Every structure is written in structure tokens, then in C-alpha cells.
Amino acid sequence: MEDFRQTYLRLCKESGVEPQESVVARLQGGGAQGSSLDLSGQSLSAETCSVLARAFQRDTVFTEVLLSDCMLSEEGAKVLLSGLSVNTTVKVLDLKGNNLRSTGAEVLGKLLALNKTLRRLVLEWNALGVWDEAFSLFCDGLASNSVLTQLDLRNNQINHHGASELALALKRNTTLQVLDLRWNNVGLLGGRTLLEALQQNKSLTQLEMAGNNIPSYTLKALEQTSGHNSERQSGLRESRSRTQVLGKEIQILKEEKGRQFLSLMETIDRQRDEMGRSSGSASIQVGQLQEALNERKSAVNSLTAKLQMTEAALALSEQKNHNLGELLTRVKAEKEEQRERQSRERRKEQEDNALREGKLLRETQNLSDTKVQLMNKVEELERRCKSQQQQVFELKQELTNSSAELKLQLAQAEDRLEMEKRRSKQALQDSDSLRQKEVEQLNRHLEECERTLQERIFKLEGQRIQLEEELSKARAVCVTERAQAEEELGRVRAQVRLEEQEHVSSVEEKLRCVRCSLQEVQLHSSQQKQTISELQAKNSQLSVGVDGLRRRTEELQQDLSGKEQEKVAAVSRVKVELQEQIGHLQAERTAQGGLREKISALEREIKVLSSSHREVLLDKESEMSSMLEKLRLKEAEIQRMREDEANRASYLQSAILTYVQGSPLGHYSSPKK
């Protein structure tokens, strides 16, 4: 527009600033058309921003100002926004991609606090959330604003501290309807604070939170709360439209009553004229009028009775509302009882898990005790082996001594060894048979030991299978509990929906009853055109009663809206509590997984220990068998040597006896005997 371009040039001359050519060209080329001013993409200097601020301080024609990607400096943004804070015509302001920082956030907070006409504010692709203090000032301005309905804060580096400040602002703000926070860094804590704020804020109907590292269940909760707000606002709009319709109908009724009253006054005047004319027939007419008055009185009494009936109906509706409140308290108590039951069941499961862990620890201790016992047995066997080795060494020494003594005798008895070799062969055969028998006994003993060890292994495997079955049972219990929780959620939702539908139907029935009563009042008022001044007072009483009914209907609507809000809050609380219970169940699942891993590790250790024990036992048994065989061989050699010595001694004795008997001394000695 030429007017704005001329004012811009004039202000540049007054302030001694050279006008920016790109801005002038944009204004000439259609940048200012109709009610919108588009300077997006123009790099505005601080001086041009000051001139534009002076222009905006005056009431302009523009209702939409687009300043996206203008590369505003901090000073320029400060001056420009301070000028816009006083403006009373701009309703849409676009500051996308201007890299606004701390000073920009502070000035925007002042703008929101002072401006009373701005409805939509776009701040996409800035850096308002980098400085917490400046962003808190921006949030304070938003909290004090009572006009803004749409706010775009996409890609502004808002963290959980900024989200908490926004939550505080939303708790105080009552006009903001659309808030876009996509592609920030709000996180889990920020999402929770915003959810708490939405439970108090009833005006925000659309909240965009994608790309903020928020879990899916919190996003769903935010969507549900914003949806409840939108539904609530739609219901409020419908109720307002209905109240407007009722107000119009009541006004129409009042106008009709005024007309009826005027017609009644006219009829009364006519009757007075007729009474003056016909004074003779006054007594007859007075009687007729008294009868008409009695009829009107009966009609008025019937109207009062109907009013009492309507009041009784209203009292019944109030009792129904009270009963519904009691039902809500009962439902809450039942929910608390269910929570206590679930907590008790969880405690029982934790105690069972603790008992199972204690059993596993006891079994590990028993295995360690058995391991210690086996080690003690091995040590005893080693001691026996050492003692047997010492005995063998002593026997070797005795053998060396005896061999030294016998070598002298062997030289004398070499001739007789041939006869003894045959006997020694038989003795060897006997000793071989004895050895075989002893080997068979040892094999039997080893087989029995292996059987006992296998039985122990089978027992341990059975215990492991039992533990796995218990773990599978715990999994099934967790799955059933989760399914029950989901079923309870569905039931609660269905009950809430049914109760809301019943409330709506009851309110509609009450409105129909009120309309019917109003129609009846209209009919009775058409019949009461010929009544006297006493009926006027009664008509005024009826109008007062209608006003009271209207007030009662408004109070009932307010009570219904409050109860609906309480229901929505209770449902949201139940949802949050169920989500927390699901999180606890998932934590318990993770704990059970850790216990399973511990059990598997213990089983592996037990298997390794059992395999090592088996190997050690086998080694020790092989060593024992070798040592026993060596001992048997040594004992057999000793027995052979002893038998040889005994045989040699017997041979020597027999030889000596034969020698003595064959000598002449024996012949001489025989007769003496």
C-alpha cells in the first residue's frame, strides 16, 4: 500500500535513516496487500527495525505481519517487538527463522504481557529455550496473556526445564488453544510436567509433541487430555447454544405475556365501560364475575400444583445426581481395593521369589559342602597313599637287607632251584587268579560310585527342571495380571461412557419437561385473558417461578459440567496409575530375567564343578588302582620270597638230615638210641 510506504519513507527522513532499498522494493512490489504485511526473507537492519517499530506504534491497517527469515539482530528484534507490544491491530505475527535468543525471549514475554490483540504467534526455528532465565520470562508473559490462541514453538531447543516453565504458564493461561512443541528436547520429565499442567488447563485442545524423546504412553496421555479438552469445549459450546435458544424462547414468552397483559388491561377497561353503561345488570354480572374468579382461582391452584410437581421433579433429579456422586465414590473405593489386592499379590510374588532364591543358595551351600567333603576324602586318600609308599619303602629296605643275607644262601642253593621253579609257577598261577578276583571287585566298586554320581546328577537336573517350571508359572501369572488390568481399563471406560450418556439423556429429558411446562403455562395464560387485577400478581409470581426454574437449570448444568470434569480427572488418574502398574510389572519382569540368568550361571558352575570333581575322582581312582596293583605285586613278591626261603630252609633241613643220616656218626648213634 502506498500509504504505508509513504509513512515508512517519512519516518526514515525524520529519524535521519536511509531507507532500505529491498524493503521499499518489496512494499512497491506487493509486500503490503490488503490486511497483511509480508517482509519475509528480507535482512532487516537495526535502523529499519526502529523505523518499523515507530510505524507499528501507530494504528495500522495490517492484521497479519510476516517477518520470517529476516536475520534480525538482538537490538533490532528488541526495538521491533517493543513497537508491536503497543499495537492494537496486528492479530498474526510470524517470526520464523530469526535466531531469537535471550533478549528476544525477554522482549517476547513483555509483548505477550502488554499486547491485547495478538491471536497467533509463530516462533519456529529460533533458540528461545537455550537460556532458562530468559525463557522463564517468556513463559511469565504467556501466563499473563489472555488473548493468544495459537503458539508455534517448533525447533527452539526447549529442554525439560523449559517444559516445566511452560507447564506453569499453561496452568495460569485460560485462552491458548493450539500449542506446537515438535522437534525440541523436552524428554520424559518435561512430558510429565506438561501432562500435569493439562490436567488443570481446560482450554488447550491441540498439543503437538512429536520428536521430543517422550515415551509413547505419555504422548497418548497428552493426546487424550487434549481430546478431553476439545470435547469439553464442544460440549460447552453446545450448552451455550442451548442456553441462548432457551433465553430467546424465554424472551418470546415474556413478550407474549406482556401482550397478554396489555390485552387483559384493555378488556378490563372495556368491562369498566360496560359496567358504567349497564348499572342495572351489575349484580348479575358481579355474580358471574365471582364464578369466573372462582374458576380462575381453581386454575391458579392447578398451576401451583403443577409448579410443585416440577419442583419435586427437580428434587428427584438432584437426588439422582447425589446418587451418581455416591456411585462414583464407590467406584473409586473399588479401584483402591483392587490396587491393594494387586500390591498384596506383588508382595506375595516377591516373597516367593525370595524363598526360591534362599532355596537355591541352600542348594549351592550343600554342593559346596559336598565339594569340601570330597576334597577331604581325596586328602585322606593321598595320606593313605603316602603311608603305603612309606611302608613300601620300608619293605624295600627290608628286602635289600634280606636279599643281602640271602645272596650268600643262594650261592649254596642254586642247584635246588630247578625243582622249586615248578612249584613257583603254580604259585604264580594262584596269585594271578587272586589278582583277577581283586580287579573284578574294584571294578564293581567303581561302577557303584558312578551310579551314585549319576543319581545325584539326575536329582540336580530334576531340581533345575522344577525351577524352570516355576519361572514359566511366574511368567503366566504376569501375563494374566496384565490382561486383567487391560480388561479393567476397558470396563472403566465403558462405565464412564455409559454414565455420560445417561447424564446427557437425563438433562435432555429435564429440558423437555421444562418446555412442556412452559407450553402449559402459555395455554393457561391464553385462558386467563378475562381475569382481574389479582391474576396479574399471580402471573408475576409465575414469572418469578420460571426465573427460578431457569436458575435451577443453569445450576444443574454447572453441576453437570463440574461432575464431568471430575470424571475426566478420575479417568486420567486411573490411566496414569495403571500405566505405573504396568511399568512396575515390567521392572519385575526384568528382575525375574536377572534371577533366571543367575540360576543359569549357578547351574553352569555346578556342572563345571561336577565335571571337575568327576575328573579328579577318576584320576584319584586310577592312581589308587595303580598303587593297589603295585602293592599287590610287592606283596606277591614278598610272599614268593618267603615261600622260597621256607622251601630253601626245608630243603636245607632235609638235606642236613639226609647227610647226617648217611654219615657214619648216624650209624653209631642209631643203636644207642
Image: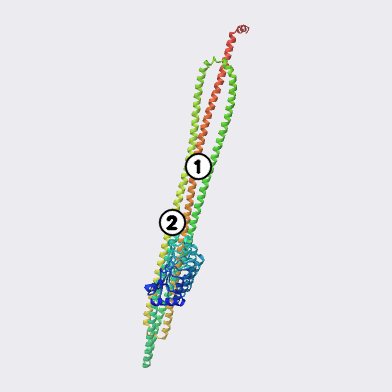
* Near-viewer residue (419 or 112): 112
Point 47% across, 52% down: residue? 590
Residue 508 placement, left or right of 602 = left
Residue 119, horizontal then vertical, whole percent: 43, 72
- Circle 2: is it few (<14), some (14-19), or many (20+) Cα within 10 Å? few
Q: Which image quadrant: the C terminus?
A: top right
In the rendered image, which quarter is residue 506 located in? bottom left
User: Please, is residue 97 above or below residue 117 in the view?
Assistant: above
Q: Does residue 25 show up? A: yes
Q: Which residue is mark 1?
A: 606
Coordinates of residue 547 in the picture (x, y in percent) = 43, 78
Mark number, residue 185 = none
Instruction: Using a 10 Å C-alpha cutoff, classify the residue at mark 1 as few (fewer than 14 neighbours), some (14 to 19) or many (20 or more).
Output: some
Q: Position of residue 288 (x, y in %)?
A: 37, 87
Figure quadrant of residue 24: bottom left
Q: Nearer the viewer, residue 31 or 196?
A: 31
The mark closer to the camera, 1 or 2, is: 1
How many discs mark residues in the rendered view?
2
Residue 484 marker: 2
265 sits to left or right of 594: left
Mark pair 1, 2: CA separation: 39 Å
The residue at 42%/85% (across/down) is: 534
The three-letter amino acid code for the residue at tag 2 is Gln
Horizontal arrangement in the rendering, residue 117 relative to residue 370 (left or right):
left
Instruction: Name the spot of residue 283 as percent of width and height, x first.
Output: 38, 90
**Amino acid tagged 1:** Ile
Q: Secondary structure at mark 2?
A: helix
The N terminus is located in which quarter? bottom left
- Which residue is more in the foreground, 585 or 16? 16
